[in-house]
Image: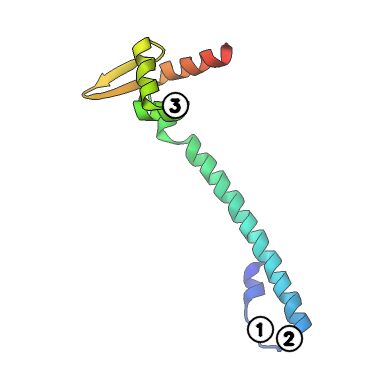
């Protein structure tokens, strides 16, 4: 049953039992609508995450690389220093190549 048809005011006087039954009916319809909205929101969030620019960018900032690896910035700088990640300089900014980050993650799962 559609929610809008349930919530239209009725000109008929309802007995308390009928009013309670109608409220339960409305509550069920609202619960189903909330569930549907939650499902749609979750699907949209998945789409937004998979389409985020950082997931397809060729270069990532140190902060973005750290967020993907779930480590701190200092750890990423140390990984660049040790050669685990390839770092490039853009002006004063240090970036990490997507390819080196992907290769590093692949080497972890291969080990």
Q: Is residue 19 rendered to the left or right of residue 103?
A: right
What residue is drawn where x is 68% and y is 70%?
26
Q: Report the front residue among 71 and 49.
A: 71
Q: Position of residue 4 (x, y in %)?
A: 62, 71
Q: Which residue is mark 2?
A: 14
For the residues labelled 3 and 1, the Cα–Cα distance comes to 60 Å
Asked where in the image residue 25 lies, by quadrant, the reply is bottom right
Q: Are marks 1 and 2 in contact (CB under 8 Å)?
A: yes
Q: Report the front residue among 34 and 73.
A: 73
Asked where in the image residue 99 lies, by quadrant, the reply is top left
Q: Is residue 55 rendered to the left or right of residue 94?
A: right
For the residues labelled 2 and 3, the Cα–Cα distance comes to 62 Å
Q: Which residue is mark 3?
A: 71
- Judged from the image, the secondary structure of the residue bearing numbered disc 2 is loop
Indicate which disc residue 109 carries: none
Q: Is residue 40 rendered to the left or right of residue 20?
A: left
**Upstream in the sequence, badge 3 or badge 1?**
1
Q: Which residue is mark 1?
A: 10
**Upstream in the sequence, badge 2 or badge 3?**
2
Q: Position of residue 37 (x, y in %)?
A: 59, 55
What residue is drawn where x is 49% and y is 38%?
49
Does residue 1 appear in the picture of this structure?
no
Q: Are marks 2 and 3 in contact (CB under 8 Å)?
A: no
**Rendered position, 25 above or below 78:** below
């Amino acid at each position: 049953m559609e929610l809008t048809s349930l919530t239209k005011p009725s000109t008929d006087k309802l007995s308390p039992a009928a009013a309670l039954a109608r409220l339960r009916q409305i509550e069920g319809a609202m619960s189903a609508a909330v569930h549907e909205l939650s499902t749609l929101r979750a699907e949209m969030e998945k789409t937004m995450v998979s389409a985020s620019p950082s997931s397809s960018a060729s270069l990532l900032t140190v902060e973005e690389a750290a967020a993907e690896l779930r480590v701190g910035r200092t750890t990423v700088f140390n990984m660049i220093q040790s050669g685990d990640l390839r770092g490039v300089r853009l002006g004063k900014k240090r970036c990490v190549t997507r390819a080196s980050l992907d290769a590093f993650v692949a080497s972890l799962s291969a080990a």
